[in-house]
Image (cartoon, coloured by chain):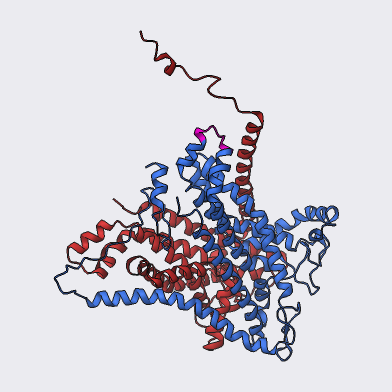
Chain colours: A blue, B red
Amino acid sequence: MTESTNSQRAAPPGENGAAPVNTPEGPVLEAPLTPPNPPNEKKVVRVGDRIFRTMATASGAFVVALIAAIGLFLLIRAIPALHANEANFLLSGRWETGDPEHLAFGIVDLAWITVASSVFALVLAMPVAAGIALFLTQYAPRVLARPFAYVVDLLAAVPSVIYGLWGALVLAPVLKPVAVWLNTNLGWIPIFGDGNVPADSGSNVFTAGIVLAVMILPIITGVAREVFARTPSAQIEGALALGATKWEVVRTTVWPFGRSGFVGGSMLGLGRALGETVALTVILSYTYEGPHYSIFDAGATFASRIALGSAEFNDNLTVGAYIAAGLVLFVSTFAVNALARWIESSSGRGKE
Amino acid sequence: MRTDTADIERPARTPAFQPLSLGRKVRNHAATTLFALAFVVAVIPLLWVLVTLVRRGLVPMLNADWWTHSFYGLLPNDFGGGIYHALVGTLEQTLVCALIAVPLGVSVGIFLIEYGRNSRLAKTTTFMVDILSGLPSIVAGLFIYALWITTFGFDRSGFAVSLSLVLLMLPVVVRVTETMLMIVPDELREASYALGVPKWKTIVKVVLPTSLSGILTGIILGLARVMGETAPLLILVGYSRAINFNLFDGPMASLPLTVYTARKTSTEAGEYRMWGAALTLVLLIMLINLIATLLSKLFAVKTK
């Protein structure tokens, strides 16, 4: 089967709800037929059918209810703590939850570290992921493309705690000179200025962002690969026939076709980076000093703050403070993921 | 001999094909090199992590006690001990998680493909499964904490961990079931209906067995994914250095939790245990991935 029939069959119109499948045999997305009911016969409804149908539908509804329950329970548990909060939840950088009588917590510092490390990771990972996806779909020999893709996917199989160890104990010492160099030579740019820990400490957003970039690489690459591979081969052949070089083919057909899908995949990666917990807990050192809005800041993200606080999970009000942080995280990842899906479904994916 | 074919046989020359200008050539080669380099950049951290793990973790693993003993009673400076307690915990927690997540996930997949096609509920469910697959693991842990421990009043236990892992495994199972059911050829279903077999029996006896190997592979990959999760464990169960078989009572170790906890013992022996546990965890996950690959090779889905 040629590539063009593959890509045509991959995307029948009106199939936005269904997950796309790509098999060597060519994707088959037609809806399974329901058993025909002859018009003159009375419709037979069997008990087994009814039970099975109810069970399947109920489990579908259960998943919907589950997401609602997550939001609801987090909200219910967060409200008492938010009432007892003596600081401004959205604008304060304090995090004092040891004494349930005098809770004072705010998320602004957590939000800065979370956003800084995730965005830094995204800036690093996006070009590399695009490069890998283009390499695997357009350049690598057919025989090697599959094992190569498998190697990249292996990055996703490594548990985050191990990335944390590697980042903190192996990568951070190697990065130290780089961090110091950036800090001394580019320190006049605010983002490379002095952080709240010395630049040579290694346990800062700089190291964390690089490790995060490695962790989200397979996610972005996976989506991008899928979209780039769907470029209609007629377009590619057309460009080649006009005398385009390989790079010009990529620039004029593959990239415009897959761009929005790639952006959607990057948003998925961002969602993953925002919620990453243990790697950051291990890498970032915790400091009580507020951030200096530099890439060499240390501190905690939403997720790592919760993980660090797990030892004091003994009072419902205290836990409520952490749950409030978790709720913010849940809402933001929900928004980012929903946006990612929306971009993907309204992109070249599934259109000719 | 005719002469009018000669023009066709002779390859076209300069006036037909202009040579590429230097700039285009350079840009083309630069792009090729850059894209290949991007791939190399991705491979470096993978190899680096694996080499680090093997170099630092292999020594403790080769100790005969490693697979049969726990860390019970070890002082910070004691070498020796083994990972058995964590292995027990990891296997129990993920197996119980699978027992809940697999039937539920397969059933959701059946709903999406066989019953709910294009219905409003199915679209909402697909969207929610997407959201669930992007759920941060720490939020899954917090939710189970708010539900199971704060609201229902149970203690922290290995079972609470299993519940939170269900949330993380469910989307994987749903996705793979959906994908596998979709490639079952309709002819099989039609043949079954033509014989008067009810729809539910068709699903159970025809559709599911046809896609079984694919679903199994997906389930095993899902297991590998949840096995390495650490974040929910931190808030849902205490760490124990002794062997605990009881999922419902008391602190329980598991491999990721052991790695995380051993990091705090900042002695040489603590590092030795930490890297040993880390390598064990990665080997276990690799082994499971390998099994999944073999399974999918052995029983590739038989479409016509």
State whether residue B216 appears in this view.
yes
Foreground of the two, B262 or B71: B262
The magenta span reads A240-247
State whether residue A315 appears in this view.
no
Residue A124: say if magenta: no
Residue A244: say if magenta: yes
Indicate the position of residue B249 as horizontal and vertical percent values.
52, 83
Res B63 quadrant in image: bottom right
Residue at image position (36%, 75%) is A57
Residue at image position (56%, 52%) is A259
- Residue furthest bottom as drawn: A101
Foreground of the two, A45 or A176: A45
Indicate the position of residue B174 as horizontal and vertical percent values.
42, 66
Residue at image position (51%, 88%) is B152
Res A215 quadrant in image: bottom right
Classify the position of the N terminus of chain B by image quarter.
top left
- Residue furthest top as drawn: B1
Foreground of the two, A310 or B35: B35
Indicate the position of residue A43 as horizontal and vertical percent values.
19, 74
Relative placement, left or right, of A149 versus B261 is left
